[in-house]
Image (cartoon, rainbow, N blue to C red):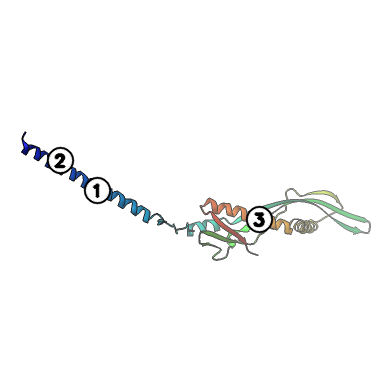
Amino acid sequence: MGRQGNRQLQLIGGMIRQHMAMTSGIVLFVLLLGILLVWLNKDNTITLNNEEHKALSPTQIQSMEEIGEWEFLSISDEEIIDTVRHGFFGDDQLVRIYYGTLRLGINMKQVKEGWIRMEGDTVIAVLPPIKLLDEEFIDEARTKSFFEEGSWSQKDRQKLYYKAHAVMKRRCLTKKNYETAKQNAVEQFGKLLRAMGFEKVRIENEL
């Protein structure tokens, strides 16, 4: 191979080295540009705020209202009630034992319009007042005479029933029992809403 051949080889080699140098320069430039962009944007973050909260549907509200009476405290009571009738030939006496169960709770059909609403991600529910759910709480089938002397009419027995009724209400419908029923209502209704998928709830009772 002559001088001309060597010169061609040198020329080709130089071109290859020049091409490699250009390629390396481009790769290095792209790499440095990427590093620069990352550094410039290191404090810039993209935050996606999900402003959509779970909402109450009319169907859910209606289903809760259709619960109707909801008992939160049951109080069993037993009373011995007597009456005496004084007569010329002696006294007549009637003693009877009464059993009753007084149920405290709410009636969901008595909620007011707008009783439940959303404020942000919190459900706020205002329940009806705690009340005695059934005035006929004496179990007449279990009522029995403990002592009976003399002749007593059905009207006499009815008066004794009303007396037992009043005594049971006075003994069982205490402020403490109403407060206990109210606390149970808040706890159980809160559990119901959380089971429906609402994490933040606030339950109140009408005064």
First in sequence: mark 1 or mark 2? 2
Q: Amino acid at mark 1?
A: Gly
Q: Secondary structure at mark 2?
A: helix
- Name the residue that disc number 1 marks: 25
Q: Earlier in the sequence, mark 2 or mark 3?
A: 2
Q: On the picture, is 203 further left or further right than 32?
A: right
Crowding around mark 1 (Cα neighbors within 10 Å: few <14, some 14 to 19, many 20+) is: few
Q: Residue furthest front?
A: 3
The N terminus sits in image quarter = top left
Q: Nearer the viewer, residue 174 or 200?
A: 200
Q: Nearer the viewer, residue 25 or 78?
A: 25
Identify the residue under disc 2: 13
Q: Are marks 1 and 2 in contact (CB under 8 Å)?
A: no
Question: Residue lying farthest right?
Answer: 89
Q: Residue 179 at x, y = what percent?
A: 69, 57
Relative depth, front residue between 2 and 56: 2
What's the CA distance linking mark 2 and mark 3?
92 Å
Label 1 – label 2 distance at C-alpha:
18 Å
Label 1: which secondary element: helix
Residue identifier under label 3? 183
Q: Marks 1 and 3: CB-CB under 8 Å?
A: no
